[in-house]
Amino acid sequence: MLKWLRKYSRSWFIALIIGAIAVVFILWGVGGLKSPRLQEVASVNGAPILMTAYIRQYNDLVRQYQEFAKGELTEENLKAMRLKEQALNRLIDETLLLQGGERLGIRVSNAELQEQIRNYPFFQEGGQFNERRYQQVLARNRLNPADFEAQERQRLLMQKIIRAITSFAKVSDAELREFFQMARETVEVRYLVVSPERFLAAQRPSDPEIEKYYQEHQEQFRTPERAKVRYLLFRAQDFQEKARPTPAEVADYIKDHGEEFTRSQVIQVRQLLLTVPPKATAAERRRIENEAQALLRQVRMGADFAALAQKFSQDERSRDKGGDLGAVKRGQYPPEWDKAAFSLKKGEVGLARTPKGFHLLKLEEVKEYDRLPEAEARTLASQRLLAEKSRRLAQDGANRARGELNTASMAEVGKKYGVPVKETPLLTMVGPVPELGAQPTFNQAALALKPKETSKVVDLLPGFAILQGVEHEDAHIPPLEKCKDQVRQAVSRQMAKKQAAQDAAKIMERLRKGEPLAKVAAQAGLPLQDSGPFTRFQGFLQQPQAEALTSAAFKLSGKDPYPPHPLVFQDKYYLLAFKARKAPNPEAFQKEGDKLKTEFLEHKRSVIFRSWLADERQRAKIKVYEIPSMFRPDHR
């Protein structure tokens, strides 16, 4: 079993918590097939994966990574994280999982679904499920009960299927000892990085080289389906003056929604604390913050919070209890801590920054609620009423305007209602709309229109829009003269990468012949960097995807300090040099006991599930159709 475990142990799938799908698998290439129905992006054993689900999954991933990045992501960042492929692979994996559950006869009963929903604290009042609160919370989030319950049923179903697949996992004492050695051993390397970027500006590809590359990689330059529209947008904010609630309306709203104007007063929470020394340098503080963010990513992708807290937390009082702080009242901790912890929902994790350090927090349960102060409740009720009334007025205006477009032009209708007519550039299925940002519903509506055709009223976050088709362009491969600059850039990148590979190979050859590392680094003009100690599960530079580098690092020794060749990660060439290795303390094995067994059992279940899913993929008939370039893998 341990040999099998090693095969998968460096996959960041190992962080999967049993009960949730949060995995990214290797790239599944996009074929040259045309979808039999334009709204399908793939099919799994004949079951379609729809474009709408695909866009929703992609945007969910973007939002998740925006939280990690603390702001907007650049196009280059999105490409590096391969979110397009992640979105598709997640949907394929979910489909395979549900199909496996169907074969196993696994179901979620209505009673199980009801129990799950009733236990959500945000649907409760005074610790009990409240039907009216349930309806109000869903309505406020623009969900209907049928859709929400269908999503919850599928989530519970996937949890049950994973538990069934992994239920036979067992741990022997021999396996546990070997796992302890493998999981706790650390290695430290020094390394150089040779990036193609340093050679890019010097590349001058010839016309024949550009022509050849274009002929061999035409799909790379395919232009996706695009559409240009003009539109009227009835913004909710433009109706706020008419929507201002009266004091009587606010009072009635609080009376009718009283149970919503509460806040958690006592919570049960877990904490993983990384302390920052009082005299820490800016670089040291950044390092600790990066470590906290890496741990936060692991938890959000499924890792067990309690196990991580026992391993990494520097809070002596709670570490041995998996970070459990017990019941916590407002005001016990600094304001920054309270703000993060008391804003969480049950099961959510967050990060607080205080003078003491970085606190990873997980809300286990809300113990007590109290009513909001009267002034705060009035402010909140006024904000909600204003938002609700503004949107209703905006929607009413858009509906009236849409009706008048049957007999008048968009310019005439826009002038009548004081709404400017806007026109977009050519839009793809996914991508920001100028002045509006990411609005996938807008893009979908735009691509569905023919020139001069008018859409129904489209519900957007800022308000309600009416679109009219101006131009529609089918997906196509442009002639070379239309995309020559793009091709030239692609050839230049290819040439720069080849030169970087050659440069890295020459440096590695010098090192393996015995030349001093510092001297070679200085002559090459490359900074000599240090990885710091890391385990197999942490990964080189805390990068779980850098499996090849991690594996190579653990093969190095004082006698054989360099790998045979440079290693590639994210299109850069890494040259590793052994620095130190540290075996785990045998006494720690006895001290960790049950904690270690639980950790290994979780890893073993993860490996079993990973193997099951890999087998399912091997047997499945998976077709990936031609899809918009925003989702197409980057083959460069």
Image (cartoon, grey):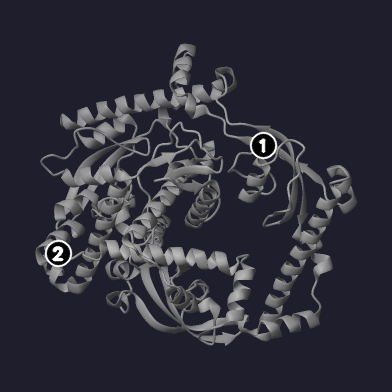
Label 2 vs label 1: CA separation?
58 Å
Asked if residue 9 shows in the view, the reply is: yes
Amino acid at pointer 2:
Leu
Mark 2 or 1: the one toward you: 1
- Residue at left offset 88%, top offset 45%: 407
Q: Secondary structure at mark 1?
A: strand
Q: Secondary structure at mark 2?
A: helix
Q: Quadrant of the C terminus?
A: top left
Residue, far top: 208
- x then y, percent, for residue 74: 53, 44
Tag 1: Cα neighbours inside 10 Å, few (<14), some, or many (≥20)?
Answer: many
Front in this rendered view, residue 264 or 566: 264
Image mark for residue 176: 2
Question: In the displayed structure, does residue 397 sit left or right of residue 550?
Answer: right
Image mark for residue 368: none
Q: Quadrant of the N terminus?
A: bottom left
Tag 2: Cα neighbours inside 10 Å, few (<14), some, or many (≥20)?
Answer: some
- Residue at left offset 30%, top offset 40%: 528
| Vertical order, 125 against 474 (above or below) | below
Amino acid at pointer 1:
Ala
Snapshot quadrant of residue 383: bottom right
- x then y, percent, for residue 331: 50, 83
| Vertical order, 307 against 206 (above or below) | below
Image mark for residue 227: 1
Asked if residue 584 shows in the view, the reply is: no
- x then y, percent, for residue 603: 25, 60
| Vertical order, 588 against 261 (above or below) | above
Front in this rendered view, residue 359 or 349: 349
- x then y, percent, for residue 492: 45, 23
